[in-house]
Image (cartoon, rainbow, N blue to C red):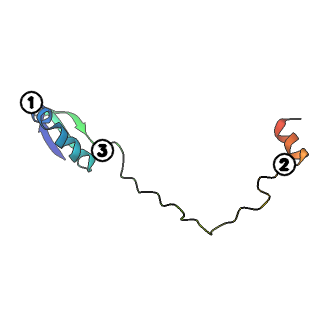
């Protein structure tokens, strides 16, 4: 964990934010006493790959067919 004084943090904010974004916490101190911590907000996210389940399952041909009347009534509370 990197420790910098508040004056240095003001003059090097962009660089410190970049360091925090890469995973290194930065502690900001006033008169040698820690007062704040600059840290990454979100963890590293993996890119989504499209088509990873291609061919793993099949959608039935009647998937969009209307429900039978008795099933509709149970949803509608009749």
Q: Which residue is mark 2?
A: 67
Of residues 56 and 3, the one nearer the viewer is: 56
Pinpoint residue 7: horizontal percent, then vertical percent.
10, 31
Instruction: Count all numbered tags in the image, as a single digit.
Output: 3
Pinpoint residue 48: horizontal percent, then vertical percent.
46, 57
The structure residue drawn at horizontal position 27% and vertical position 42%, both measured from the top left corner, is: 39
Mark 3 and mark 1 lie on one chain; the one further toward the N terminus is 1
Pinpoint residue 61: horizontal percent, then vertical percent.
77, 61
Local packing at callout 3 (Cα closer than 10 Å; few below 14, some 14-19, many 20+) is some
Can you say whether 76 is above or below 22 in the image? above
Can you say whether 9 is above or below 64 in the image? above
Q: Would residue 35 be found to the left or right of residue 74 on screen? A: left
- Separation (CA) of disc 2 from disc 1: 71 Å
Could you tell me if residue 31 is visible in this image? yes
Q: Which residue is mark 3?
A: 40
Q: Which residue is mark 1?
A: 31
Determine whether the residue tagged by mark 3 lies in a helix, strand or loop: loop
- Hey, which quadrant is residue 31 in on the image? top left
The structure residue drawn at horizontal position 89% and vertical position 35%, both measured from the top left corner, is: 78
Q: Would residue 72 be found to the left or right of residue 52 on screen? A: right
Determine whether the residue tagged by mark 2 lies in a helix, strand or loop: loop
């Amino acid at each position: 964990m990197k420790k910098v004084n508040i004056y240095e943090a003001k003059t090097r904010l962009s660089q410190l934010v970049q360091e925090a974004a890469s995973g290194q916490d930065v502690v900001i101190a006033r008169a040698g006493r820690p007062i704040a911590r600059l840290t990454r907000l979100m963890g590293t996210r993996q890119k989504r790959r499209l088509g990873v389940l291609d061919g793993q399952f099949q959608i039935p041909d009647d998937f969009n067919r209307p429900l039978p009347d008795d099933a509709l009534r149970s949803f509608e509370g009749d």
